[in-house]
Image (spheres, rainbow, N blue to C red):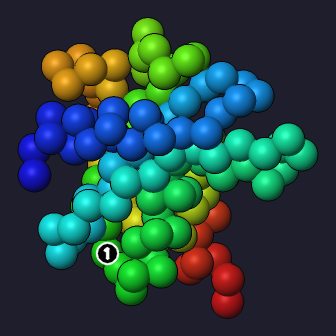
Amino acid sequence: MTDKELIRLAFDAMDRAYAPYSLHKVGAALLTKSGKVYQGCNIENAAFSPTVCAERSAFFKAVYDGERSFEKIAVVGGKNGEVTDYFYPCGVCRQVMSEFCGDDFSVIIAKSEDDYLVKSLNDLLSCRFSPQHIV
């Protein structure tokens, strides 16, 4: 799957976001090493702490289905679903990625299918706490 195809699926996921409080809709599309794609969107809650980000939504769906090996994820987002800038994963989502992915895991942050950045997980979370730290 190309980066552009994955970005397109992230935009599709963003359309399903439930964001009545922040108005920031976010979509993610996660590609597994087996070739499956899991989409996720943010789902907000009035109490805020139960809110789930798009990236975690996609990861949790994949893990529930037994997936444990991941290739890359595309992330898009913006206020009222209008993407005007790069929308980076939050720290909690980066930590979830760290649980399942190595330093070279690709995170695609996109404004459009033609305007995007590709960062490694290590670029986004260089001093990460990972399962290997638990002895």
SS class of the residue under badge 1?
A: loop
Where residue 72 sits: x, y (%)? 29, 54
Q: Residue at x 34, y 61 (%)?
A: 38
Where residue 116 sits: x, y (%)? 27, 24
Q: Residue at x 55, y 57 (%)?
A: 56
Q: Residue at x 47, y 64 (%)?
A: 59
Q: Given the current orientation, which residue lies at the most extreme top position?
A: 84
Q: Given the current orientation, which residue lies at the most extreme right position?
A: 47
Which quadrant of the figure has residue 39?
Answer: bottom left
97 lies above or below 11 = below
Which quadrant of the figure has residue 133?
Answer: bottom right
Amino acid at the residue labelled 1? Ser
Please tell me which residue lies in front, 42 or 125: 42
Is residue 122 at least partly visible in the picture? no
Is residue 41 at least partly visible in the picture? yes
Q: Quadrant of the C terminus?
A: bottom right
Q: Indicate left or right for 11 with 121 as reference.
A: left
Where residue 48 sits: x, y (%)? 83, 43
The residue under label 1 is 69
